[in-house]
Amino acid sequence: MALRIVVLTKPVPDPAAAAEKLGPDSRLDRAASPAVINGNDEYLLEAALKLADAQGAEITLLTMAPAGGIETMRKGLAMGAHRGVLVTDPALGGSDVLSTARVLAAALGELEYDLVFAGFDTSDGVGGVVGAAVATLLKLPYLSSAARIEPDAEGGKVRVRRISPTGFDLLEAPMPALIVGTQLLGEPRYPSLKGIMAARSKEVVTKSLADLGLDGEQIGGAASATLVTGKRTPPPRAATRVVRGTPAEGAKEIVDLLASRRLV
Amino acid sequence: MRKVSTTPAPSATYRLTEEQVLLRDTIRQLADERIAPRAAEIDRTAEFPEDIRQLLASQDVLALPFPTEHGGLGADLLTICVAIEQIARACATSSLILIVQELGALPLLIAGSEEQKARWFPDLASGKTLAAFGLTEPEAGSDAAATRTRAVRDGDAYVINGTKRFISNGSVAGLVTVFAVTSPEAPRHRRLSCFGVEVPTEGFRVARLEHKMGIRGSPTAELTFQDVRVPAANRIGEEGQGWDIAMGTLDRSRPGVAAQAVGLAQGALEVAVAYARDRKQFGQRIGDFQMIGAMLADMDARTEAARQLLYKACVEIEAGAPDASRWSAACKLVAGDTAMAVTTDAVQVLGGYGYIDEFPVERMMRDAKITQLYEGTQQIQRLVISRALLGREG
């Protein structure tokens, strides 16, 4: 049977537009900037698509976002994902990490899957813990920092090469499991134009909190345990120095520079 | 639980559909990341960019103009032009691969039989075969009806003799749609017929490649035909229908050139804006000098005006407007002149840096000139429009 993979994807302000700004409530003003799929999520989608190419897989995108999230999801469908689930509800505005993880866990509870993929972190919140929180809530094996993902559908287990500061670890876990991956999984593909044309006929299911049996009083912005109390612009970066030349020359210059500052 | 289809609603608004926007953004990213870095080298070496052809084929870009039942995407004219525009924004030469693929295949799209479409479209849509459009001759440019190339029926074949000149992709195409005289004595617009010539074939020769000012990576060939036998089954449309097919082709292909022109203008504008933001003189960024700021504003407004005329023309032509020729000529006229003006101004904004190949605007300016010349000079576009306004005498 084909693997069933759910990829968690989040729409984030397009970093290329550089129009990101906060609203009066100190929350991200999502209308100020065009949205794109979080860059790190695309690496996981690519990993899922490669598995689909190699051994067959049914890929579902799962997104929690305002209603406009359906537009960013369409790119993932055009890249080759098979269907989408969008959880959207006005009560979700201002959700913190725990709320988000609870909602995603509830949505996953209604899906059948062998693997859940999540990106390393998002370029807007940069928390990097939602994947771990979802795994914890669902009591799924959690395999992080994946550079390679090798499911064994017959054996019902998955093997992951996890990068670490000293090299890599080989992890193995029974499926279903949740995997957080890195950019080492490989460059995301461009959607083909055939994929774009095909995306229109793919199903996207939208669900509200009520559909998931969740209470807007207990979850989402109203129940958020974190609060933005202030904001400030980070100080400008100190002057940077760009080293040019061949890799060998550049490496030597950088090492000399670090050595002169007693950093190596 | 609600199920919603991701199908965009029929365009009730004056905007691109969500699908067209996604397609535009995808091709823009492709062009920025994979085509723009090659553009200067393609121009310098004047070599046909086989890698870009493969890239466009692998991303289904070349499938856009062809019907879905033959492996294409069945895209409408506006969608095709949006794609051309985004490629041309990075590299005008590369955009010609799609433009000419459509141009060369248009006679088949307009008048091809089902058998011909089934025979040729799958390989054209996949990009395995490239097409070229063989109308222009050394002595028949603007006056296309003065074509001298002859096709004489001989049993179940035609024998073609003559010379075609300025044929884009003529040296890399596997299928050339050739216009030749079948009835020398017939009235001026009933003399021509159209043929699908599979090349290479005996008697067919690429006689020379032109050295050009711009679009240097797009091979422009002189093709000679010496007793080239073409099966009668390759005649596209009826005998004597060639002129109508050629004119119908140009009605639909000129917007492609207009899209190339709009893309060139947009590309040059973006380079000029980025430069005017970074470059400091007299202690301030040059874009803040009113003379430069005004130039940028005019460049942007003109480019947008040309784009909107193009998009409107595409929709009118697709809808079968009776004055399709007028729309087609008008968008090419305005967009070509806009591309020339905007790329020239971009060079001006960059000053001395605009004149050297460290920046892409001098290439864009050279590339822009062709959009005022091919698929009918600007003078011919004006002739087409004025005839539509006045009607022919008598």
Image (cartoon, coloured by chain):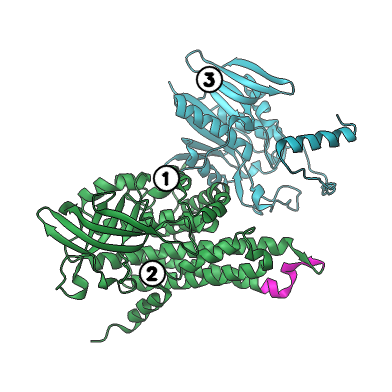
Chain colours: A cyan, B green
Tell me the CA gap for discs 2 and 1. 27 Å
Left/right placement of residue B182 relative to residue A116 reads left
Q: Quadrant of residue B355?
A: bottom right
- In the rendered structure, which amino acid carries the disc numbered 3? Pro
- In percent of width and height, residue A180 lies at 63, 27
Tell me the CA gap for discs 2 and 3. 55 Å
Nearest to N terminus: mark 2 or mark 1: 1
Find out whether residue B291 is within the magenta segment: yes
| Residues marked 2 and 3, same chain | no
Left/right placement of residue B285 relative to residue B205 reads right
Residue that numbered label 3 is attached to = A151
The answer to whether any part of residue B346 appears in the image is yes
Q: Nearer the viewer, mark 2 or mark 3?
A: 2
Chain bearing tag 2 is B
Q: Nearer the viewer, mark 2 or mark 1?
A: 1
- In the rendered structure, which amino acid carries the disc numbered 1? Ala
Chain bearing tag 3 is A
Q: Residue furthest bottom?
A: B394
Element at label 1: helix
The answer to whether A93 is drawn above or below residue B285 in the figure is above
Element at label 3: strand
- In percent of width and height, residue B296 lies at 64, 69
Which of the pair A149/A186 is nearer the observer? Answer: A186
Residue that numbered label 2 is attached to = B328
- In percent of width and height, residue B346 lies at 62, 67
The answer to whether B239 is drawn above or below residue A244 in the figure is below
Magenta stretch in the rendered image: B283-294
- In the rendered structure, which amino acid carries the disc numbered 2? Ser
